[in-house]
Image: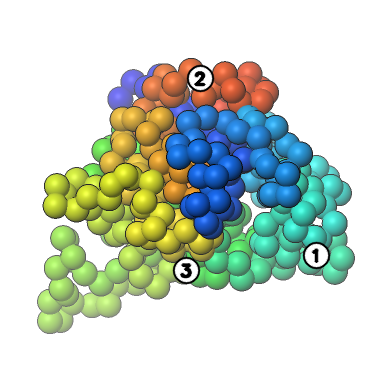
Amino acid sequence: MPNQIIQNRASGAIMGAFIGDALALGPHWYYSLAELHRDYGEWIDGYTDPKPGRYHAGLKAGQPSQAGFILRLMVRSLVECGGYDEADFCRRMDEELFPLLDGTPVSGPGRYTSQSIREAWRRRVLQKLPWGQTGGHADTTEAIERTLAIAVRYALQPARLASAVAGNAILTQTDDTVVSMTVAYGAVLSLLVQGHAFDTELSARLMEWVKNGELPFHAVTRDNLQPPRPGDPDPPRAGRFASPDALLTPSYMAQAAADPEIRIEPAWKVSLVYGMPCAIYHQLPAAYYLAARFHNDFESAVLHAVNGGGQNQARAILTGALVGAQTGLSGIPQRFLDGLEEVEDLNKLATDLASQVGAP
């Protein structure tokens, strides 16, 4: 594949995440769809101001949440260091984010701080613990929301991707299942940046990386998930993750999206099928489904993610990156770029990072 095509996809993934974050700023965390429709109408089709008394109140349409702020820190670190440098990222968190927090939920950039970041702040700032002892047990997607940039940077280097994503994730979230699902999302995103289709064969490609020792997942099945034969040795552990199930999920979602007998209509009701809450096991199936169903339609994918309510910001970030990687930056409608605050700087960061894909 020509390098410029990969760079277009890589830029699209990063900008897709920034757009998804900002699109959900206003209607974030409405668990009553009736209240969501009362405040924003039956269909949200662009950037909106948060309502008074709601999450992110006081911010304006097109601005980032704290997830967008941290993603920007990560992208800048990757660009300026030429790759993932844990010490540099941690320094930026210490100097650019933590001084703006006070340990309460309603504080800091974006006017809301998630559980995992609050816990890291308490351990780092109040308890003076070193990085590496700052992770908590939040079962949410905050690690994905920043490490997706690492996945883009190492889209052609799966072993490096897995190591860097896992290492960064455990800075704030230590649960093995959460970390494994975070690494799996990054691996999926990397395949889309490479140009692979989000289809029923995607998981088989991920399993090849497992068999080659490039992804740290344990698996005993043979090709096509066939059972082991009598006498087959137990394969060596390639890493910390007990099973490859997080890698198998995406193709099941793709199969559901392609099956004419399985219809979620309208598609925003994917949030009701897989769940509106924040936990990673609700968020990933919905994002995978929307990314497979609207693989060439960025607008439909992110707007259905937003209109599903609940934790629609995480859903829109994850979906925006996955679909942006498939359409490329050139496939993102201009209106979504025009409405994004500081879009020139974000676009430069995205293109600078994309230019590094494949570099040592």
* Number of numbered discs: 3
Q: Residue at x 54, y 22 (%)?
A: 337
- Residue 5 as seen in the image, left or right of residue 317: left
Task: Name which residue type carries label 1.
Answer: Arg
Disc 1 vs disc 3: Cβ atoms closer than 8 Å?
A: no
Q: Distance between the residues labelled 1 and 3?
A: 23 Å
Q: Residue at x 40, y 73 (%)?
A: 242
Q: Distance between the residues labelled 1 and 2?
A: 39 Å
Task: Name which residue type carries label 3.
Answer: Thr
- Residue 322 as seen in the image, left or right of residue 96: left
Q: Which of marks 1 and 2 is nearer the N terminus?
A: 1
Q: Residues within 10 Å of mark 2 (few under 14, many from 20)?
A: few
Is residue 47 visible from the viewing direction of this image?
A: yes
| Mark 1 lies on residue | 122
- Residue 185 as seen in the image, left or right of residue 74: left
Please tell me whether mark 1 or mark 2 is closer to you in this view: 2
Q: Which of marks 3 and 2 is nearer the N terminus?
A: 3
Q: Determine whether 223 is above or below 2 in the image.
A: below
Task: Name which residue type carries label 2.
Answer: Arg
User: Picture coordinates of residue 289 (x, y %)?
Assistant: 32, 49
| Mark 2 lies on residue | 335
Secondary structure under the numbered disc 3 in the rendered image: helix
User: Picture coordinates of residue 224 (x, y %)?
Assistant: 16, 60
